């Protein structure tokens, strides 16, 4: 092993690689130029013992594939040179990738429209891990002794680590690298890796696709297990950026390290078991996932829904592991897109060492697998399985991208035209410069044999993935089912074809808190993620009509929330109705009072010639009964739906009826006083001023004043029906607004003035000598009247809604019954039950 090979193993940094190239250039004849280090002669880059496969051509491209397994090789110290053990075995998957390159080159050479005048060749080496990959890359780029032909492009890098190494090593020579499997987002940086291209999308896109799945299925509470490396950390970061503000939260994020996988897998499994997250996102290599799934089986945790990254979503080793079928069913994964390559299966089945005597890889594979002369034509083998070509198709695309870049470079519209400022893309096959090919790779745009458009966006291609699902077969094993695709920002999914971890088509739920139902709002818990919250019922007059509402909306005026707080409904009109119990009771009492008053009127009419009726002016007694009946009946105007005319009529009827009633009582009281005062010497002329005509005139005068007040009030600012929105509730009160409080106060004040005057006069006449002094009855009735209306004012002011009207009706009925009972009940008792006392002699006796 040369000193150069040992030095190349020290690290992958671009600075160190540039130093190596510079040192080697000085030793073997390279010289620095304006565009970096350019070869001027062919030389051998260290003595290599690796296997290889080559085919001559006008243009030869390089290929690096990790065909063998690399053993431990670096010396523990630097006092001795490092020792390399040969790679052992042949990896079936990598062998298929290599033959995809060979097949693509052969297919291109048969085409008449792509590189028609030249033949492509290839030189394929076994990278055997990242350390040998650097040596082999330099060997391809610098040429080997005897061949004096370097490759202008390398197809390789089966991991992101190797991709960074190859780009750094070959970057100073501007040799393009097209990777088929390096997916680290870091490789998209054109400043650090200007010569790197790939036919696999960046991991950012698969992380975003998995975030879209979580958002689409409303999985708001997700656990994550990621590899403790760039692959896991960058994918998790991209996932978190995509779900930001989308209502999806991470319940936990566990990391697993391959060196401590057993301990890390157990810790992650315990976290999954303890968490209420039912969907688990896993970005890790399939060997790490296998250990994690085995730990979950030990803990009997078999009801989790897994989201798989492409690193393990299509792993045959996991799918064919019978022990994992219990926990692996229902896995939903993002996979490298698959595509058919026509003729590739027949090509693989036709492989045989006897047909390819120089193919050392095929011979080693054949000796290990068969050891004889078996044929692949009728044998079911992983090498010949082309049902889902994923990485192999990426290799196929890489070869076609290289071919189209060469086609652009070698196509000269006018070869006789001189080159100007290196602007022409024309070149000669044997003198192709890698930097020219690099420039043309940036601009390739073609249609693949499968009919899809292909072009590079910087280092990347447009993101395309398959969506796959692990489904249980009737035999209990697992099979891989294609259920959708991701094309850029377009996600197509046949959800009905998905078999979930529950074993059915029922979508599993994974939430920290169930979505708040309509009628409630979300309230975040202090110190917890936004996906964990409490559901608070909306208050009265507020609604939320969507699931998971953040706020409750206030209902507009004249609307109120329903019982479930899900909709605003028109507020019910609330007024004192004849149909409700309170209205029925007041109506009954009012009608009873009117009937009782009518009955008294009939009794008085029948006994109008008796002394009891004729005493104190029977005409005023009949007028008083009429006014009392009007008082009882006017209370009915207050019941029912308020209207313009009912509002105007009720207060006027109430005011005039009571003034008429109290006026009659006041005149009666004055007559009693005048009658007794006229019996004194010198007062005989007093009764002349209080005859029947004067009494009627007095009543009319007192009543006309109230009528004038009512007319003025109704003319200037009459009561109007209105909706009282001040009282918040499901009902809005329909009431009669006073219009002018002064007018209502004048009506009540005038009634109160007459009542107080009447009470005072009756009180003065209560002890006048007579067996039947009506002044006593008037005194009691006016005391009740005044007490009722004094209590009415605070009750009226403090009563809400329709109860304001009920209080006024109660005051009208109470005062009316007080007058009826106190004044007429004793008279009716004498008339009907004690007729012997209904005589003038008895009434006049002291």
Image (cartoon, grey):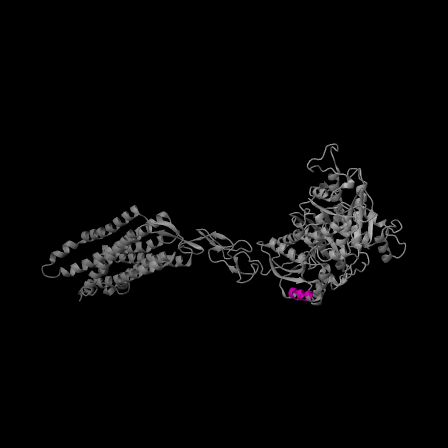
Residue 109 against residue 736 in the figure, above or below: above
Is 140 placed left or right of 650 in the picture? right
Q: Position of residue 276 (x, y in %)?
A: 62, 63
Q: Quadrant of residue 671?
A: bottom left
Residue 592 visible from this viewpoint: no
Residue 298 visible from this viewpoint: yes
In the foreground, 633 or 339:
339
Q: Position of residue 126 (x, y in %)?
A: 79, 53
Q: Position of residue 447 (x, y in %)?
A: 73, 41
Is 762 placed left or right of 236 in the picture? left
Q: Position of residue 527 (x, y in %)?
A: 54, 63
Residue pictured at 87% horizontal, 57% vertical: 367
In the foreground, 300 or 409:
409
In the foreground, 46 or 733:
46
In the foreground, 752 or 453:
453
Residues in magenta, as a range: 264-272
Residue pictured at 18% horizontal, 60% vertical: 672
Q: Residue furthest left?
A: 682
Which corner quadrant holds the N terminus? bottom right
Residue 577 against residue 777 in the figure, above or below: above
Is residue 268 a member of the stretch shown in magenta?
A: yes
Q: Quadrant of residue 499?
A: bottom right
């Amino acid at each position: 092993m040369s000193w150069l090979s040992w030095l190349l193993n020290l690290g992958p940094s671009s600075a160190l690689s540039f130093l190596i190239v510079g040192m080697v250039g000085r030793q073997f004849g390279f010289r620095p130029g304006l565009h970096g280090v350019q070869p001027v002669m062919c030389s051998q880059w260290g003595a290599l013992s690796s296997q290889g496969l080559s085919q001559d051509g006008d243009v030869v491209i390089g290929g690096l594939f990790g065909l063998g397994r690399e053993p431990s090789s670096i010396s523990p110290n630097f006092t001795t040179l490092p020792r390399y053990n040969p790679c052992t075995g042949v990896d079936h998957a990598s062998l298929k990738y290599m033959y995809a390159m060979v097949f693509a080159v052969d297919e291109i050479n048969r085409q008449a429209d792509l590189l028609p005048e030249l033949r492509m060749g290839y030189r394929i080496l076994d990278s055997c891990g990242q350390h040998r990959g650097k040596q082999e890359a330099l060997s391809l780029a610098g040429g080997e002794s005897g061949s004096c032909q370097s490759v202008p492009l390398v197809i390789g890098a089966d991991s992101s680590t190797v991709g960074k190494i190859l780009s750094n090593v070959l970057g100073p020579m501007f040799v393009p690298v097209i990777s088929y499997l390096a997916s680290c987002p870091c490789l998209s940086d054109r400043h650090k890796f200007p010569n790197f291209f790939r036919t696999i999308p960046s991991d950012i896109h698969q992380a975003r696709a998995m975030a879209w799945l979580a958002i689409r299925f409303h999985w708001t509470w997700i656990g994550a297990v990621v590899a403790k490396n760039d692959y896991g950390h960058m994918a998790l970061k991209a996932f978190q950026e995509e779900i930001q503000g989308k209502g999806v939260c991470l319940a936990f994020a566990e990391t697993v390290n391959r060196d401590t996988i057993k301990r890390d897998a157990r810790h992650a499994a315990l976290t999954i078991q303890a968490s209420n997250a039912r969907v688990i996102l896993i970005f890790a290599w399939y060997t790490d996932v296998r250990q994690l799934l085995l730990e979950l089986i030990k803990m009997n945790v078999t009801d989790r829904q897994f989201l798989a990254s492409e690193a393990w979503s299509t792993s045959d080793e996991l799918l064919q592991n019978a022990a994992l079928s219990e926990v692996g069913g229902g896995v939903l994964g993002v996979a490298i897109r698959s595509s058919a390559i026509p003729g590739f299966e027949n090509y693989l089945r036709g492989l045989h060492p006897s047909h390819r005597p120089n193919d050392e890889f095929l011979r080693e594979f054949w000796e290990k697998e068969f050891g004889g002369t078996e044929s692949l034509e009728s044998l079911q083998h992983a090498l010949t399985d082309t049902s889902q070509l994923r990485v192999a198709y990426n290799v196929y695309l890489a070869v076609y991208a290289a071919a189209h870049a060469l086609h652009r470079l070698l196509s000269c519209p006018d070869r006789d035209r001189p080159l100007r400022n290196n602007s022409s893309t024309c070149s000669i096959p044997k003198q192709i410069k890698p930097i020219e090919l690099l420039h043309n790779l940036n601009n390739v745009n073609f249609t693949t044999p499968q009919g899809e458009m292909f072009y590079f966006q910087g280092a990347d291609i447009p993101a395309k993935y398959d969506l796959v699902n692990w489904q249980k077969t009737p035999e209990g094993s697992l099979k891989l089912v294609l259920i959708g695709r991701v094309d850029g920002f377009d996600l197509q999914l046949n959800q009905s074809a998905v078999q979930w971890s529950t074993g059915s088509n029922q979508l599993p739920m994974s939430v920290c808190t169930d979505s708040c139902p309509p009628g409630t709002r979300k309230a975040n818990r202090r110190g917890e993620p936004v996906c964990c919250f409490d559901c608070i019922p909306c208050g009265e007059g507020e609604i939320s009509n969507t699931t998971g509402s953040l706020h409750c909306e206030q209902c507009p005026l004249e609307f109120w929330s329903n019982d479930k707080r899900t909709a605003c409904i028109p507020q019910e009109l609330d007024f004192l109705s004849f149909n409700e119990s309170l209205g029925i009771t007041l109506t009954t009492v009012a009608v009873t009072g009117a009937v009782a008053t009518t009955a008294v009127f009939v009794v008085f009419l029948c006994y109008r010639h008796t002394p009891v009726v004729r005493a104190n002016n029977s005409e005023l007694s009949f007028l008083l009964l009429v006014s009392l009946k009007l008082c009882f009946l006017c209370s009915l105007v207050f019941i029912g739906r308020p209207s313009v005319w009912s509002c105007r009529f009720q207060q006027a009827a109430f005011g005039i009826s009571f003034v008429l009633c109290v006026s009659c009582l006041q005149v009666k009281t004055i007559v009693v006083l005048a009658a007794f005062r006229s019996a004194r010497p010198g007062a005989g002329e007093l009764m002349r001023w209080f005859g029947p005509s004067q009494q009627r005139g007095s009543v009319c005068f007192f009543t006309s004043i109230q009528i004038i007040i009512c007319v003025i009030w109704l003319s200037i600012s009459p009561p109007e029906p209105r909706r009282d929105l001040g009282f918040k509730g499901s009902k809005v009160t329909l009431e009669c607004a006073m219009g002018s409080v002064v007018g209502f106060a004048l009506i009540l004040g005038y009634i109160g003035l007459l009542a107080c005057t009447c009470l005072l006069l009756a009180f003065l006449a209560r002890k006048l000598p007579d067996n039947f002094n009506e002044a006593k009855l008037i005194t009691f009735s006016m005391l009740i009247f005044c007490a009722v209306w004094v209590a009415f004012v605070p009750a009226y002011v403090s009563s809400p809604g329709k109860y304001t009207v009920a209080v006024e009706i109660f005051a009208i009925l109470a005062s009316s019954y007080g007058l009826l009972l106190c004044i007429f009940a004793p008279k009716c008792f004498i008339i009907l039950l004690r007729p012997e006392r209904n005589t003038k002699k008895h009434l006049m006796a002291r």
